[in-house]
Image (cartoon, rainbow, N blue to C red):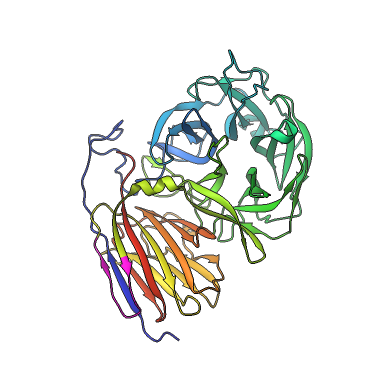
């Protein structure tokens, strides 16, 4: 039973200050200021966006390509949009990199630096950046063919600014499979060959190549393992610690409905991926982290991930204009041993901390009340340590506004789970599938729990115990959620910091 309720009120004061815009698309002093526009997450200036593609670090820049339809805010003929960043926080928009052609739309894929010039595209000692992507031929699909998806390549010799498509595309024809897409490629140094992971209907196929142009089938994985509520998409195979990790997105079939990303832990011998068990694991239990993959060619040893912050259940319908969709914060992945389980943890890259401006300390006993009044815009982070005598008791964090709209993050130790309830957080009229409490399993058996919540206008990213559990969720309030209330059973002690965060698009 709850012996008494403890309330910690956090009041976020809004200051509407504007600064001079760059590349002002909407008029003076309005760049990236539209209603529901996230202020420190990547989103396109206008039009539709979904999967991140071609993530590669080269010549001091993090490149992010992405599925893009420039003529509408709903999905259409896919291009590769393009942006670069030097710090994963501040992004520069670049012109569209790849356009549809006679072979089809440009679906998802990856990019690498071909340092050894295995492809032969390099010139005068300059290593090319090579992209591999899926061609999707819509006319063939309409005619009933099942071989309308193939793999093509393109290359750049000017750090991704301009691209030349290989004149003998496709490099991997379709063998007779309807869903045959999303190639993710890396260089396997020990065997001096490229490895491709390809989503093939309900499983992953691995291919290898020595020159990026001729591909050999190696093996299949997953037809009878993992979650199979929908089509498999956007694979990514990489080494993390002493294990190989295989990311696989699935739509539908996520743990809270719609699309989500599962992962497998195992070993890879250059041909076959062998999982250590048959457990189904999810990278993020929120409803809005899909199709995420990791950067190639990172030079500091980190494995950095980013995902599309939406869900195919309602991605075409969310109430934003003149753009639609954003990406999650970039996250550093690590493999942790928690009990007998191997868990891929994810937490925001350290560069995100440069957004912090004012810090207000939180320090409380079970009978105290704290009010926080940070100055700045409605962008903030709660970094908390929750401590109890034996184990953490139930609690809720309620974000709300003057219209009585609220978003609730809660922990229930009896059911061993976190929940996010956004049903009353604002506009949800655009889709019945947007509602429903999101659940993430978490069995806390210790006396201390670390909690990090990052809020950006209409998104919340929850990281528990350094990302052992992650939940990402969109919401669309009519006014900023300027207050936070912590409700808990007696026995917990809450300490930490509340940070005001600054926008990244000035």
| Horizontal arrangement in the rendering, residue 278 relative to residue 429 (left or right) | right
Q: Quadrant of residue 321?
A: top left
Residue 431 left/right relative to 229 = left
Seen in the picture, residue 271 relative to 342 is either above or below; the reply is above
Closest to the observer, 161 or 477: 161
The furthest residue to the front: 300
Asked if the magenta segment contains residue 401, the reply would be: no
The x and y percentages for residue 480 are 29, 57
Q: How many marks?
A: 0
Q: Is the C terminus in the top left, top right, bottom left or bottom right quadrant?
A: top left
Which quadrant: the N terminus?
Answer: bottom left
Q: Is residue 479 visible?
A: no
Q: Nearer the viewer, residue 321 or 11?
A: 11
Q: Residue 206: horizontal and vertical position, in percent?
A: 73, 39
Identify which residue is drawn at 68% across, 53% down: 265
Q: Position of residue 493 (x, y in %)?
A: 39, 75
Left or right, 415 with reference to 181: left
The answer to whether any part of residue 263 appears in the image is yes
167 to the left or right of 357? right
398 or 374, which lies in front? Answer: 374
Instruction: Name the chief secondary structure element in magenta.
Output: loop
Q: Residue at x 47, y 27 (%)?
A: 96
Residue 369 within the magenta-colored segment of the rendering: yes
* Residue 329 picture location, percent across and down: 45, 47
Q: Which residues are magenta?
A: 362-373
Question: What residue is at 43 percent from the left and 60 percent from the top?
Answer: 452
Q: Please tell me in which quadrant of the rendered image residue 398 appears.
A: bottom left
């Amino acid at each position: 039973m709850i012996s008494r309720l403890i309330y910690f009120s956090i009041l976020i004061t809004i200051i509407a200050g504007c600064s001079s815009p760059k590349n002002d698309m909407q008029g003076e002093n309005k760049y990236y200021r539209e209603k529901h526009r996230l202020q420190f997450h990547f989103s396109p200036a206008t039009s539709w966006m979904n999967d991140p593609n071609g993530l590669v670090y080269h010549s001091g820049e993090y490149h992010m390509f992405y599925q893009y339809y420039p003529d509408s805010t709903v999905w259409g003929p896919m291009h590769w949009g393009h942006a670069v960043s030097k710090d994963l926080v501040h992004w520069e928009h670049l012109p569209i990199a790849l356009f549809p052609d006679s072979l089809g739309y440009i679906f998802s894929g990856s990019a690498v630096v071909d340092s050894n010039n295995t492809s032969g595209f390099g010139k005068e000692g300059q290593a090319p950046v090579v992209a591999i992507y899926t061609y999707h031929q819509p006319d063939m699909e309409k005619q009933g063919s099942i071989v309308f998806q193939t793999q093509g390549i393109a290359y750049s010799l000017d750090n991704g600014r301009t691209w030349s498509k290989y004149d003998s595309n496709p490099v991997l024809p379709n063998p007779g499979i309807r869903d045959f897409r999303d190639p993710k490629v890396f260089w396997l140094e020990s065997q001096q060959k490229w490895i491709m992971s390809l989503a093939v209907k309900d499983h992953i196929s691995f291919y290898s190549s020595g020159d990026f142009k001729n591909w050999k089938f190696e093996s299949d994985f997953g037809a009878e393992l993992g979650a199979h509520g929908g089509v498999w998409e956007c694979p990514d195979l990489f080494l993390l610690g002493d294990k190989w990790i295989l990311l696989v997105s699935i739509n539908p079939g996520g743990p809270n409905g719609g699309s989500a990303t599962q992962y497998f832990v195992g070993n890879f011998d250059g041909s076959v991926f062998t999982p250590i068990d048959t457990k189904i694991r999810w990278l993020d239990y929120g409803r809005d982290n899909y199709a995420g993959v990791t950067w190639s060619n990172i030079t500091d040893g980190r494995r950095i991930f980013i995902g599309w912050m939406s869900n195919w259940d309602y991605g075409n319908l969310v109430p934003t204009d003149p753009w639609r969709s954003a990406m999650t914060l970039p996250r550093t992945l690590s493999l942790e041993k928690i009990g007998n389980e191997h868990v891929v943890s994810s937490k925001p890259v350290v560069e995100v901390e440069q957004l912090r401006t004012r810090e207000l300390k939180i320090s409380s006993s079970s009978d105290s009340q704290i009010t926080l009044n940070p100055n700045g815009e409605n962008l903030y982070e709660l970094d908390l340590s929750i401590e109890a005598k034996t184990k953490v008791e139930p609690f809720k964090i309620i974000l709300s506004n003057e219209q009585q709209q609220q978003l609730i993050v809660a922990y229930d130790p009896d059911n061993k789970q976190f929940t996010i309830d956004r049903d009353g957080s604002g506009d949800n009229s655009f889709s019945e599938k947007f509602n429903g409490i999101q659940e993430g399993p978490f069995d806390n058996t210790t006396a201390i729990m670390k909690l990090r919540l990052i809020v950006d206008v209409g998104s919340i990213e929850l990281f528990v115990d350094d990302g052992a559990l992650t939940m990402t969720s969109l919401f669309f309030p009519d006014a900023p959620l300027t207050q936070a209330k912590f409700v808990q059973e007696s026995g917990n002690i809450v300490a930490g910091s509340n940070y005001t965060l600054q926008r990244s698009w000035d």
